[in-house]
Amino acid sequence: MADDVLILTPARLAATRLPGKPLADIAGLPMIVHVLRRAQEAAIGPVVVATDSEAIAAAVEKADGRAVMTRADHATGSDRIFEALQMVDPEGRAEVIVNLQGDEPQIEPAALDRLAGLLGDEAGADMATLAVPIADRDAYLSPNVVKVVCDDRGRALYFSRSPIPMVRDGEPDFAARPARFLQHLGLYAYRAGFRGCLRRSFSSSARLRSVP
């Protein structure tokens, strides 16, 4: 297990689309425990769940995982990640922070390893994410699937829930390689220097919440 990689998993009960989702039962275990175990299987660094729920924290700790309590009024997962990071790694020892969402019970451990490795491959990048080829028209058209368009170097240009890149004439060729139609996976890795951006995001969110 590496000392320079830290996996943080934000999880909250008050989800808009499916409240209580992190505790949803999957094969006898809460979803968040499946996420925790997949992250642990990657063996790339310590795994910590950041939550605002005593119930989620209890489920994680019952599974011999680590959880930290964060505020309930965070506007984004990044805000929750930054608060947790201050508690878990106040000295800034971690060089790479992986943000693994708490609703990814089927994430492949190898994908987490690859995500952290991308920052090693790209010395000039402060942040990395993952995408996979879209295989069919239903996924391409679905607003529940976030798409991403990348340049020739594999750097993300823009994201959308709409079908992108748009094919005006004919049909999308999902079999073409390299793949043009990509589904974004909700995983991010940040270089340690990116903490400043997380801090500004956290501060900005706090200011917005304080506006009467």
Image: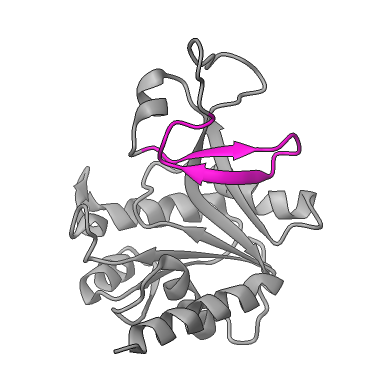
Residue 18: x and y in percent read 19, 53
Residue in the picture at 78% in, 49% down? 121
Most foreground residue, 56 or 72: 72
Q: Is residue 184 above or below residue 192?
A: above
Most foreground residue, 37 or 149: 149
Horizontal side of residue 120 vs 38, given as left or right:
right
Residue in the picture at 26% in, 68% down? 56
Segment tinted magenta in the rendering: 145-165
The image quarter in which residue 3 lies? bottom right
Most foreground residue, 136 or 112: 136
Which quadrant is the N terminus positioned in? bottom right
Horizontal side of residue 79 vs 119, given as left or right:
left
Name the residue at the front extreme.
Answer: 168
Name the residue at the right extreme.
Answer: 123
Asked whether 11 falls inside the magenta stretch, the response is no
Residue 149: x and y in percent read 59, 37
- Give the colour scheme shown: one colour
Residue in the picture at 24% in, 51% down? 29
Residue 146: x and y in percent read 43, 41
Q: Is residue 145 above or below residue 173?
A: below
The image quarter in which residue 124 lies? bottom right
Asked whether 156 falls inside the magenta stretch, the response is yes
Horizontal side of residue 79 vs 22, given as left or right:
right
- Total residue callouts: 0
Horizontal side of residue 207 vs 199, given as left or right:
left
Which quadrant is the C terminus positioned in? bottom left
Residue in the picture at 36% in, 46% down? 105
The image quarter in which residue 26 lies? top left
